[in-house]
Amino acid sequence: MTDKRVGVYIHIPFCVRKCAYCSFYSSAADEDVKESYTEALCKDILSFEGKGIGCDTVYFGGGTPTALESGQLVRIFDAVKEAFELDGDAEVTVEANPDSADLRKLETLRAAGFNRISFGVQSLDDRELSALGRIHNSEKAVSAVTNARTAGFENISCDMMLGIPLQDTDSMLATAGRLTDLGISHISAYMLSVEEGTPFFEQGIEADDDRLADMYLALCKQLGSEGFEHYEISNFAVPGRRSRHNLRYWQGREYLGFGCKAHSFFENRRFFCDEDTAEYIRVDSHRLTVLEEEPDKPEEYILLMLRTSEGLSFERLGLLGADEKRIGRIRECAKRLESSGLCKLSENGFSLTEKGFLCSNAVIAELELC
Ligand code: SF4
């Protein structure tokens, strides 16, 4: 078994219908396009065959991966297993829309080795779901989670959203409570962000920062009291169920992305596949755009690790190339943040508090100037 390990990300850019707030690269597609895309993905993945690269996490994201047939998802996963040396205990996640994950499909995926599923639930209030333009209702979402458990998935995550039109703190907490009552092991909670080009933007819907902050802190408190560890700005897990794939991103470890618009960090370069679906299907050799060669390691470490409850270590910062003076300035800055209740400082390093997570962008910008 090789020592080199990557995470593998597979991008499926298809959705049944575009949600009103979505700015991701995804669209509806007919069956021929989905099949051609599956073939192109397999070919792309198999180009890594024989390179002796190991893999400990696989993540099918989108779009909506379950917009593909289960047989297509299994073929893509088989290509991953052929091209990479997959660890026996690899975490294999598939994102799913509650509307396109029936029991049979879930059973097929579980039997093929998928062992983690992440549902885009967003809310269990039907008025809020319809305001978002989601195709599922709360009943579908609950039955998708139940079906996943019946199919043998023990590691189930749900996405929920804060700041939905018509949502208030009570309805948001009620969604979280019903999800945890279903026995799920992980919640990703994202704040609504209104991006240009989306129907929400056209309708003049705006995120209310104060309301979002109140909701966020209330959610942190409720999930904490139910045994969920708040291990990253937007992510909560019961012990032992943190997303190993996403931790790889935040810890600055290597990953390879396949599919149009998929990002990679490999051999010290950050790059992404700058093609649309049609181009990706058409060409054999994919156009990769390099975002960064040799990223500034201390800066990147600060940016990524301050998202996590682990925070950053001064020793590691030094090992990555930050000199004593810079570390001293960062330590002073952390003292100021601590006096405002935004971080927890120790001899060895510091991490942001939940209040600090709320203004992490401003904190990171301040640290970058140190
Ligand atoms: S299901 Fe997800 S990716 Fe697809 S349109 Fe809705 S938000 Fe976007």
Image: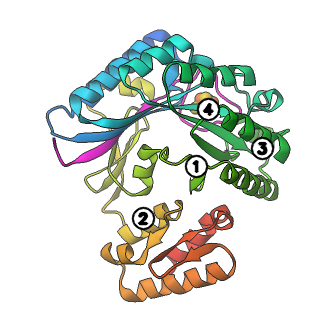
Amino acid type assigned to the residue bearing label 4 in the image: Gly
* Disc 1 target residue: 235
Q: Nearer the viewer, residue 118 or 224?
A: 224
From the top left corner, tell me how far across and down residue 359 is, in percent. 66, 65
Q: Is residue 292 visible?
A: yes
From the top left corner, tell me how far across and down residue 5 is, in percent. 26, 46
Amino acid type assigned to the residue bearing label 2 in the image: Glu
Say what secondary structure mark 2 lies in: helix
- Label 2, label 3: how many angstroms apart (C-alpha)? 34 Å
Say what secondary structure mark 1 lies in: strand
Quadrant in the picture for the N terminus: top left
Residue 173's disc number: 3
Classify 10 Å Cα crowding around label 2: few (below 14), some (14-19), many (20 and above). some
Amino acid type assigned to the residue bearing label 1 in the image: Asn
Q: Which residues are magenta?
A: 1-28
* Disc 2 target residue: 300
Q: In front: mark 1 or mark 2?
A: 1
Earlier residue among tags 2 and 3: 3
261 relative to 169, above or below: above
Say what secondary structure mark 4 lies in: strand
Q: Residue at x 39, y 16 (%)?
A: 72
Q: Main secondary structure of the magenta part?
A: loop
* Disc 4 target residue: 120
159 relative to 104, above or below: below
